[in-house]
Every structure is written in structure tokens, then in C-alpha cells.
Amino acid sequence: MNPDTVYRPLPATFTARDVMRDAPVIPVIVVHDVAHAVPMARALVAGGIRMLEVTLRTPVALEAIRAIAQEVPEAVVGAGTVRSAADAKAAAQAGARFAVSPGFTVSVGRACRDLGLPLLPGVATGSEIMMAQDEGYDALKFFPAMQAGGAAMLKAWAGPFAEVSFCPTGGVSPANAQEFLALPNVACVGGSWLTPADAVAAGAWDHITRLARAAAGLARPGT
Ligand code: 3PG
């Protein structure tokens, strides 16, 4: 999404593919202090990134999701690090509108479907892709992308899994994002670089807006 354009309204129900298509980068966010959640979300939205993955890795993660959902209407907050059906339920109750998981299990897949929560399940092997497809998922997170084979792995998967769209995450940075985004089976990438811990701790929201703006402006020639 061009940061200078107005956000297109999302339909009442949207899919994981819609989440992936919205912008070139999904920020992977770790919130340690709930007071940071709302200004951080506003900073990202101001830079053209509204799909926000708040990871369930800290004690305040659900509270952060709730705060963003209530106070930043332009943002579409999702939960990351969803590892169980209980995580999915808690995230949805807090206001998460999509979920991202580091791996795939049938129970997480079914829980998200029952909750109406679009899910980007994590995969790192062909068997995991096939299990996710068996459960109806074909918009997948490739995690951990760099450690599990990087762009070369995605090129190899484009043959047998041509219909699958990926969001590589893990070791993706401004230095290599464009290489991933050029691939026809990559819709977007995920990464933590938009919300560096030191910038968040310092309340450097303008810096985060600049990082978001640069990310939002990345080209996606592959899609
Ligand atoms: C994570 O789970 O932390 C994400 O994959 C982010 O990884 P990154 O810090 O390498 O972007």
C-alpha cells in the first residue's frame, strides 16, 4: 500500500490472503509495556502499515491487542505466536482479527476456522504444507524463512505447490525483503524490524513511522 493513499475499507469478513495482500510487510511485534501498544500501532498506521501482528510472547500481549483494537480503529490487529486453540480463543476475545502461528496443527487450524479468525499457519516443509492444505489453508507463513532455506526454498516449492501463497518470516530484513517479494509465490513478508526494541523503549514513534513508510513502499513485482 502506498502510504499516501487512504486505506481501502476492509470487508466485514476477510481472508488470510487479504491480510497478506494489504501491504508488503506484516510487522512482527513484541510488546513489553502495554503503554507502548497504542502509540506504536498509530505510528505504523501513519506509515502505511495497518495489519499488525502482536505476538503472544509477553504477559501484556492480550492487553496490547485489546488496547489497539479499541483505540486504533484504522489498525487491523492480529495475534502472532498462536500455538493452541486456547491461544486462538483468547486472542479473538481480546479483539484480534487474524492469527499467525509459528507452525501448523489441525487443532489450531480448526479453532481459528470455528472462531472466524483468518489464520496464516507457519510451515517449513512440504509435509507441513500438505497438512495445512488438507485443512483448507493455502496462504501460509514460511517460518523461519532464512534458516529453513530462504528464497531458494520458495522457488523449489513454486513447482509442486504453485497455488500456495507465502509470507516468509524470520531473518527477513530491508536487505533481503525485495528478493523475497520478487517471487511469484510471495504475497508479503513478515519481520520485526519495523518496531526495534530500542526505538519502542525510547518512544521514537516518528522513527517507527519512517520504517513503516519505507516498508509500505517496497515493490511487489512478484504478485
Ligand atoms: C519472530 O517470530 O520473531 C519473527 O519471525 C520475526 O523474526 P525476525 O526478528 O527475524 O524478523
Image: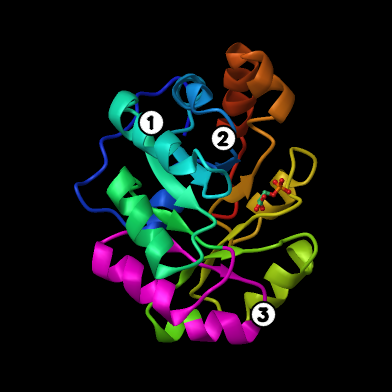
* Residue 98: percent from left, percent from top: 38, 52
Mark with earlier residue (3, 2): 2
Q: Secondary structure at mark 1?
A: helix
Disc 3, disc 1: CB below 8 Å? Answer: no
Q: Residue at x 44, y 34 (%)?
A: 64
Would residue 17 be counted in the magenta stretch? no
Does 214 appear above or below 124? above
Instruction: State which tag comes first along the sequence, 3 or 1.
Output: 1
Q: How many residues crowd mark 2 within 10 Å: few (<14), some (14–19), many (20+)?
A: many
Start-end of magenta stretch? 102-131
Dot 2 corresponds to which residue? Answer: 31
Q: Residue 180, how many percent across, how many down?
A: 69, 54
At a point 41% along the width and 50% down the height, the residue shown is 19
Residue type at numbered disc 1: Ile
- Mark 3 neighbour density, 10 Å: few (under 14) some (14–19) many (20 or more): some
Give the foreground label among 3 and 1. 1
Task: Say which quarter of the image contains residue 32.
Answer: top right
In the picture, the disc for residue 68 is 1
Q: Horizontal and vertical percent for residue 80?
A: 51, 52
The residue tagged with tag 2: helix, strand or loop?
A: loop
Q: Residue furthest front?
A: 59
